[in-house]
Image (cartoon, rainbow, N blue to C red):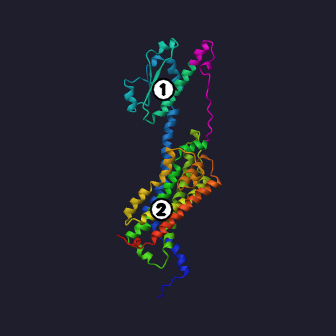
Amino acid sequence: MSTTTTPATRTRAFLTVFLKEVKENLRDRRTIISAFLTGPLLGPLILVMLLNITLNRQFDKAEKPLPVPVIGAENAPNLINALKADGIVPKTSIDNPELAVRRQDADVVLRISPDYATAWRKGEAVQVELIYDSSQRDANAALERVSQVVEGYARQQGAMRLVSRGLSPSTAWPVQAARRDQATAQARAALMFSILPYFFVLTVFMGGMYLAIDLTAGERERQSLEPLFANPVPRWKILAGKLAAICTFSAASLLISLLAFGVVGPFIPTERLGMELDLGPRFSGQVLLLMVPLIALLAALQSMVAAFAKSYREAQTYLSLLMFVPVLPSILLSTMPIKAQGWMYAVPLLGQHLGIMQLLRGDGVTTEQLGLCLAGSLVAALIGVLATVRLYQSERLAISG
């Protein structure tokens, strides 16, 4: 029987390998859960749920009646009335306020000095204490609310003292600083959701990770890679089919994640924070475009790293370590806030992070920035693919054990 292969047979090799790997891994429960459920769906749902719970608790403390233990309430009845007018409900005093806030029995305790009334009648400055624990995050909203009421009451009474002496209230404040915040509603939202670029990159990584492990180390462990290489087909075509399968799963995972964020985005109460978050189709399309070359780059890196492993478990360990690479730009920009430079968009991962952040801010990505981002990541992806192709030429790759 002739073993000669026609050009048409070789042309179909890529498609055959691609379809084979996709069909086989669609039957693998672990791959399906990782690529289509755990990362792209569960992540957005958990993020939105946690944000809603946290924000609603903060809103409740900012808007609903706030119980605050007050020590020495009888010494400042007018201050107590001012607190009540703003929805702060004075509670009976407690013996050990410091211990109470540390145990989270109270978010904040107001202590009024016994000589408050005497100093007030003399026109002297009086002091009240706000006892709280700054390590308790829930206490911040309550502290801010009580502080604003006390400071507002102090300014009002100070102005009345000046008027009673025939002076203008502005005498005490000859200079007033007027703040002009130039941040848009979307820019403020981008600060809160700065984790999204890393989340999208991690979704792409997780979407193709188990597939990359199975198509290299997995087949090597099952001793099915050697018969595959024995076929009269160039190995780069076999690799191309495998990479295409990995990219397909990664892209599908990212697409599901973008759709999930588009669906759950409106349920985030950003309007109550004075923010605006647009995760609609336009945002999703631009993010997908920015991530296309990165999908190919991560697929090549995953395949190359997994090829060095002799077993599925070993490859899983290697790729788990590789997973820390996508977090580097997020750590860099969060610990060292720097002004974005043009060349940064050409750096893989960093360029995607900057581009997605600009989309979140509503600034958009310029044609030059988009070109740099795509070109830089495509070049890196090409280098990664060529390095993996060279690795696939080694005969040791097909040998297990």
Image x and y of residue 123, in percent:
53, 13
Where residue 150 appears, as percent x and y from the top left, is: 52, 24
Asked whether 309 or 24 is in front, the reply is 309
- Indicate the position of residue 211 as horizontal and vertical percent values: 45, 64
Residue 286 relative to residue 385: left or right:
right
Q: Looking at this view, is 362 or 367 the one in front? A: 367
- The earlier-in-sequence mark between 1 and 2 is 1
Please give the range of residues in magenta.
158-184
Assess disc 2: are there few (<14), some (14-19) or many (≥20) residues with their C-alpha within 10 Å of its C-alpha: many
Work out whether 347 lies above or below 211: above
Tag 1 secondary structure: strand
Nearest to the observer: residue 234 or residue 218: 234
Name the residue carrying label 1. 89
User: Residue, x 53% and y 46% (percent of image)?
Assistant: 194
Residue to which mark 2 is pinned: 301
Quarter of the figure with residue 400: bottom left
Kind of residue at disc 2: Leu
